[in-house]
Amino acid sequence: MALDFLLEIGSEEIPDWMIEPALDHLKAGFTKLLATHKLKGEVAWADATPRRLVVLLTGLPKAQKDSVETVTGPPKSAGEGAALGFARKMGVAPEQLETASTNKGEYFCFKRKLSGRPAGEILASALPQLILGIPWPKTMYWLGKGAPRFIRPIRWIVALLGSNVVAFEVAGVPSGNTTWGHRRLAKSKKPIKVSVRNYEQKLLDNFVVVRAAARRRMIEAGIADLLAGTGLRVKPDAALDNTLCYLTEYPAPVLGSFAESYLSLPAEVLVTVMRHHQKYYSVVRADGALAPHFIAVMNTASDPEGFVRAGNERVLRARFNDARFFYGVDQKKPLAARVDDLKNVTFQKEIGSYYDKVRRMAELVEGDAAALRACELCKCDLTTDMVKEFTDLQGVVGGIYARAQGEPEAVAEAIYEHYKPLSMEDSIPSTRAGQLLALADKLDTLRECFRVGLIPTGSKDPFALRRAAQGVVKILVEGEAGGNPLDRITDGALKTFFEDRVRYYFRDVQGFAYDEVNAAMACGWSDLKDLAARLAALKAVRPTENFEPLAASFKRVRNILDQAGQEESGFPGGAVDAALLADEAERGLHAAMAGLNLAGLSYQEQLARIATLRPAVDRFFETVLVNAPEPHVRRNRLALLHHLRSEFSRVADFSEIVTSSN
């Protein structure tokens, strides 16, 4: 009979952003545990609230299947005495031994039956290590130094295999069959006995919604009820949705308000204060303009007296007052007057100040007037009180202040957007000046960090260099900045780093097949718009009937030329001597190559024409002996193949394409 296994790790509140990685680790850990111990079953689901991590396994057997283990003893040639000794060691009579044939001869052996371990025993043995092995960014002691560490103190553990408790202990906490409800709302102020079947319902009865998706639906439904008939809507924020799901066990939205006068502040400032500092949703009118309202999400059922709403309004009012004060103070000293202040703002101790950084960036902007002015001012907001208080607004505040202080719109917009893209899902700067500025900022950071040895290793990337490089790639492919800055990279490690980022972008973000990416990049990758065009052409032509067979032939060409390069001194090289082309098939291939005329064609048209060479290439390999005994004939035929590969692999190296014949 198949069994279900339920694990709940109860603890003090876990930081919301650490929960999903912990669940991923638990799911992977249980999957590996089942495979290692040859137990059927699967991870049905894993979920969490701030106070509990929960995993449910289904389809587990009571025990492993019985197995037979063959123990090899001494060689048969060792004689009867060796066999007796081996039998005593195995605890059996000599006649129960068998012989096994190996490549070293005949050996005595014994096949012993092993009873499968109970699933509960396996789980009890593995779970302490699995739980304590969750790779939290930070952990803590709570039982004294040297005791087990976890993200927060563990308070209870539920471990049920079917109806039975799987007994083990972690940090002095024994497993059992009791959990705890909501910290404030629970009907029971004592431990709650649960089974696998009634676990979720028992917790729901005590105001704990175990599934994050269900809590998200509660938040969405609550917001819809609050805004029904008002003409208002919440500003979408998927990241905040996720945060609030893992900050609450029984969420309930509440609608709050603030004075209209605060709307005179830039909307970006108000939204940042609400979102990043208070975890509130912003509310907008039908036209998208910010409304003087917010939505907070309580970890409680209701707010009948309005105390929670009033408390949130009071806190937000204080934060907005701070922002209004900072805005007013900052305007007394415009960005242009702050340039020299950047000398006192360190970018990195070995690299220098932001003043130094801006000077270097100006050399990369390539003469665009708006980008040059934006470059001069783009880091000045780091010296403002607003950014010192609300660091997430750097760049954004600079753009807002530049606009308010009369800088040209192109300059203000470039400053506002120059940190973009912040991820592969984010958009690039919308203007050419902004793209040039963003490229200069990111390229300078990468170049200087690599110069002083600050190169990402493993998961460590304190200057977000991977994100910066991905941003450069995304801007160069999707933008209109022009130029080819990757060609100017001279640091070998940085060039390799960029090559990896380019490969990732086209393979994992754009979805090209890995061999298509390899084939196109083998012919050059620093001009990313050109690479994108070649990849698109390659993907379009690949399904045609002649392409992959021709690619297989190109792989054969590569192998022949590689071998010739090792064996023939001074090869590859040399022109094809038409007078030495004696075989009809080699003359036909030479003529077909000469007749393609690829000039002026698009990459897709070039590839389509190259694919028409397939019959001529096939006939060549069917009838022509490349390694002819006459040295001059052999070298001429190798030169023909070298010409074929070099002339027609400018779009992509076809030999990198994986075909059914590979």
Image (tube, grey):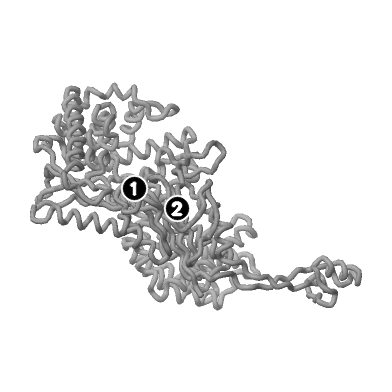
Count of all numbered marks drawn on residues in the image: 2
x, y percentage for residue 424? 33, 51
- Relative height, residue 491 to residue 234 (above, below): above
Asked which secondary structure carries label 2, the reply is strand
Q: Residue at x 48, y 62 (%)?
A: 160
The answer to whether residue 456 of the structure is visible from this angle is yes
Q: CB of mark 1 within 8 Å of CB of mark 2?
A: no
Mark 1 nearby-residue class (10 Å; few <14, some 14–19, many ≥20): some
* Picture quadrant where residue 636 is located: bottom right
- Relative height, residue 595 to residue 261 (above, below): below
Mark 2 nearby-residue class (10 Å; few <14, some 14–19, many ≥20): many
Q: Describe residue 388's horizontal placement relative to residue 145 as left or right.
A: left
x, y percentage for residue 399? 21, 35
Q: Residue at x 77, y 72 (%)?
A: 110
Give the amino acid type for the residue marked by disc 2 in the picture: Ile
- Relative height, residue 197 to residue 446 (above, below): below
Q: Nearer the viewer, residue 190 or 615?
A: 190
Asked which secondary structure carries label 1, the reply is loop
Q: Describe residue 321's horizontal placement relative to residue 569 as left or right.
A: left
The answer to whether residue 42 of the structure is visible from this angle is no
Give the amino acid type for the residue marked by disc 1 in the picture: Arg
Q: Describe residue 604's horizontal placement relative to residue 66 as left or right.
A: left
Question: Which tag is nearer the camera, tag 1 or tag 2?
Answer: 1
**Which residue in the structure is indicated by mark 1?**
183
Q: Nearer the viewer, residue 424 or 486?
A: 424
**Which residue in the structure is indicated by mark 2?**
9
x, y percentage for residue 304? 17, 47
Q: Residue at x 33, y 51 (%)?
A: 182
Whichever of labels 1 and 2 marks the residue nearer the N terminus, that label is 2
In 3D space, how far apart are the residues under numbered discs 1 and 2 (Cα atoms)?
16 Å
x, y percentage for residue 510? 35, 58
Q: Nearer the viewer, residue 14 or 31?
A: 14
